[in-house]
Amino acid sequence: MRFRFPACRLPRFAALALLLAAGPAMADESRIATQAIRCSAVFAVFIDANAGDATLSAKFQKAQRIFDEVYANERRNKSAEAGPEIAGKRASLLKEFRDNFKEREPYLHEEGVLCGAWAEGFLAQGENWAFIPVIPKVIAQSAREEYTRIGPPSFTRWAK
């Protein structure tokens, strides 16, 4: 006889299994910290792939610095020592992106759109951002168009 979970418990069991599979990294970081460091890595791709465009490069570097700062603030590590941790996590994510590019390319493109839309919420605040915009669940059409235009070719150039 096979044991079966009641249908009402299956979603909770699946969520618990995913949480446990994620390991200590998930327990140590908030959702904002996790997404901020992922967006920092996405913008590292955009910076590298668009190095020839000074305007885009400057915008992308500013967005990456913001995401690094958000990550450090979320981790409560606002000191200079956060730099090596951020660089190490970003490098690890970039390796993950590269290693899984062929299988995950559409997901990376969509993450580029999400990170781009989130970055626009910070960049719209000017030089000194004062609040953290919510990670977008709804993305403005203008941001979707811009980062759909920028993202896929950037990831393709970067992955080669």
Image (spheres, rainbow, N blue to C red):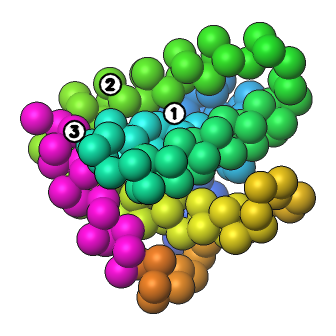
Q: CA distance from mark 3 to mark 1?
A: 30 Å
Other residues around mark 2 within 10 Å, as few (<14) / some (14–19) / many (≥20): few
The image shows residue 36 at horizontal and vertical percentages of 63, 45
Residue on which disc 3 sits: 158
**Residue in the foreground of this view, choosing between 26 and 74:** 74
Determine whether 96 is above or below 121 in the image: above
Marks 3 and 2: which is nearer the front? 3
Identify the residue at image location x=32%, y=41%: 51
Q: Amino acid at mark 2?
A: Lys
Q: Amino acid at mark 3?
A: Trp
**Does the stretch in magenta take in 159?**
yes
Q: Secondary structure at mark 1?
A: helix
The image shows residue 140 at horizontal and vertical percentages of 53, 85
Q: Amino acid at mark 1?
A: Ala
Residue on which disc 2 sits: 95
Quarter in which the C terminus is drawn: top left
Horizontal side of 11 relative to 158 (left or right) equals right
